[in-house]
Amino acid sequence: MRLKTKLGLLAGAAIVLAGGGCVISATQDAGWLRTRIVSAVEKKTGRHLTIDQLHVWLLPFPWVEAQGVHLSDPGSDAHDMFSAASVRVRLSVLPLFQHRVVFSNVSISQPQIMLHRDEDGQSNWHFNPQQNTPEEATPAASGGRVNWDIVIANLELTQGDLQWQDELKHRSGELPVEKFEAGALDTDAPSFHLDALKNKGKLSVDGQTGRLFPHPATQMPVQIKAAFSVDGQPAGLAHIDGTLTTGEPEQREYALRFGGSLGQLQAVQAFFPRAGLPHAENISVNGMIGGKAGIPQLQNFHIHTGTFDLRPYKKDVVLEHLTLDAAQSDSPVALDLAGTAEGTSLGLKGTVGTAEQIMTWLHAPAESSMPVSLTLTDSDAGVHFTGELGGQHSAFDIQGQLKHLATGPSQPVFDGLSVKGHVETDETLELTKVHSFANIVRNLTAQLDVSAARVAWAGQSWEALSAHVVNSNGRLVADPIQARGSGVQQSARFVYDVTQEIPAAELSAHPVVLPLQVVDAWMGVQSWLKGEAFVVGTVSARGRDMSALRQTAAGHVGISVVDGKVGSKILSSLTMNKIPMKQEVSVRCFGTHMQLADGVATIDLLGLQSRFLSLHGHGTVNLNTTDLDLHLAPTLMLAGNSAESDVLVSGSSYNPVIKMEPNSSGRYGLTIGKNDGEDDSCPALLSSAREGEAGPEPAPPAKEKGGKVMNMLRGLGLFH
């Protein structure tokens, strides 16, 4: 037999054997290869890899298919960082003889990736390759065992899902990946393409880097471009390009440029529907990252936003624009911000550290600090803040004036507001995390002198307001607080103490004139009166909210009103005769004095006088439920005569129940007598309610012309 014929028979036999081997391999689990793959992956990652089934095809070219692939989280086989329904791999044969597993093409179906960081900052995306033991380093000593390198040339993922959960910063999210392709991974120019689809949004990313396998390039070029669209319309662009040096962290260097723009911030909610992002538009960012020794540094950057509506986070605050600029890493970062807060146009301009200091702050905030020089502007006036902002210690000198400042709906409005003083803290980061009023008082040291030319609140105004405020060692003291309004020189003292577990507060008024509705809101009751409340007394309380403060309130308070108004409905009910009065009735004077304890206001004095009705009495009011127990004696003056009866008011201040009350003998009665109109109880009533303080006096009783019955009807609002 000729040599040519023999070679043909041998080739045919090889093909038959290979085909039979292909069929056998395709139907049996290829445990021999699975062992090597699992060992190599665990060696490279320090994680446990499991494969439910692994099959090999030799013809028409070598393929490996793995079903049920799972890569564990660090330290736990119960949770997967990565899983896939199937992984199909085209295998290069010749590299196997060099102890290299080269996957020329990898196709992964339905991959699931979970990135997780726990409360201690441990993340599952950091791998810990196993170290070679001396025996592994010497193949002869280990029975010929050798290490296998894994190389992937091309990778394709379809119908995947990327999830992340950050327990340290309380953030989580999900990104469905329609397709991910990576090509030429074993060359000097790998390329990437990603398509992510969610709701109406689409994210497409294209990129190229330097060599990744089997060993990353020392100088790694990076070029990445991203495009974002919603409903098929362009919504945003971003890019990163430059180089970085790989290797150990202390040897890494960065030279990267970045940039991006976004027309509408809320468009991002197509991917993150629960983010609750505010309305913001025309956002652009660009800059350069450099640095050595593994710490990236901002070399320069520019950030700009158009309208930025912060009302979902801070009521009635809207930014008109925000610009941050840094020309180079060691130059000050310029800040320019303008917007409205509570209806007042304000701006903030100045400098905040340098780009290098900001990066240090982001990397290690507790160990960093930066100089700050900012001016809060209102028209051509401004308040200047100069000092140091640190992760721990911060200190600022404050001085300046604002022409106009509104603090919110139904809150005071200040004109000609001036402030001068010093503020510092050793717990800056703590205050940024928890900035409740109690925590600010606990961690801040301040001494401020505040004044305002005019203050308006709820239809009332004050002039020449001044306050000296000291906050130190968990104790805030504003003393004195002085102003002039309603023809009265007013003075108050306020103390808020958080040195104990439960905060304590104390307020003294000597006197203070306030809108009556403000006093009612603090006490948690609904008043039947309108007017200016002349308040005297001292009250202390402990608690973290208004309910607790009312329950623990202790002290004495006097409240009086002159020339006020009272609802005609309540007056009609008090007289028990259902006289149909119209609208409101003028009140010459009202006064009450009470003792506060155990959540109850015990009223030892309650009086009122109008043109044709007066009353006096006593009782109690529950400060949390507003339940009433008032014993009143209203007197109705009619045509030179008077009619008086005892009345019990129960129910609540929002829904009072009024009925006649029996006298000491248990009988209901009505006392009728003469009234010549000369009795004026206002001076004595106001003096008792004001604890002897001088205050505005009511207008003298009107001397009416005409019949007394007609005068009474006019006073009740039935005639004009």
Image (cartoon, grey):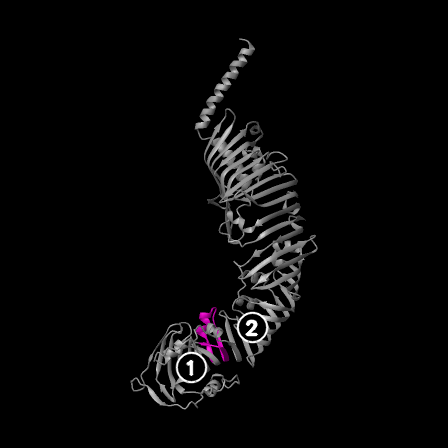
Residue 60 lies, with reference to residue 635, above or below; the image says above
Name the residue located 49 percent from the left edge and 69 percent from the top edge: 501
Q: Position of residue 273 (x, y in %)?
A: 49, 50
Q: Position of residue 75 (x, y in %)?
A: 50, 46
Q: Position of residue 659 (x, y in %)?
A: 33, 79
Q: Quadrant of residue 314?
A: bottom right
Q: In this figure, which residue is indicated by the disc labeled 2?
A: 456
Q: Tell me the CA gap for discs 1 and 2.
A: 34 Å
Question: In the displayed structure, does residue 186 sit left or right of residue 52?
Answer: right
Q: Position of residue 150 (x, y in %)?
A: 56, 35
Q: Is residue 16 highlighted in magenta?
A: no
Q: Earlier in the sequence, mark 1 or mark 2?
A: 2
Please tell me whether the stretch drawn in magenta is mainly helix, strand or loop.
Answer: strand
The circle drawn on residue 498 is: none
Q: Quadrant of residue 454?
A: bottom right
Closer to the observer: label 1 or label 2? 1
Could you tell me which secondary element the residue under label 2 belongs to? strand
The crowding category of the residue bearing disc 2, from other C-alpha atoms within 10 Å (few below 14, some 14 to 19, many at least 20), is some
Q: Quadrant of residue 395?
A: bottom right
Query: Three-letter amino acid code at disc 2?
Result: Ala
Q: In this figure, which residue is indicated by the disc labeled 1?
A: 714
Question: In the displayed structure, does residue 333 sit left or right of residue 278?
Answer: right
The crowding category of the residue bearing disc 1, from other C-alpha atoms within 10 Å (few below 14, some 14 to 19, many at least 20), is some
Q: Write the start and end of the magenta stretch as one range.
A: 529-558
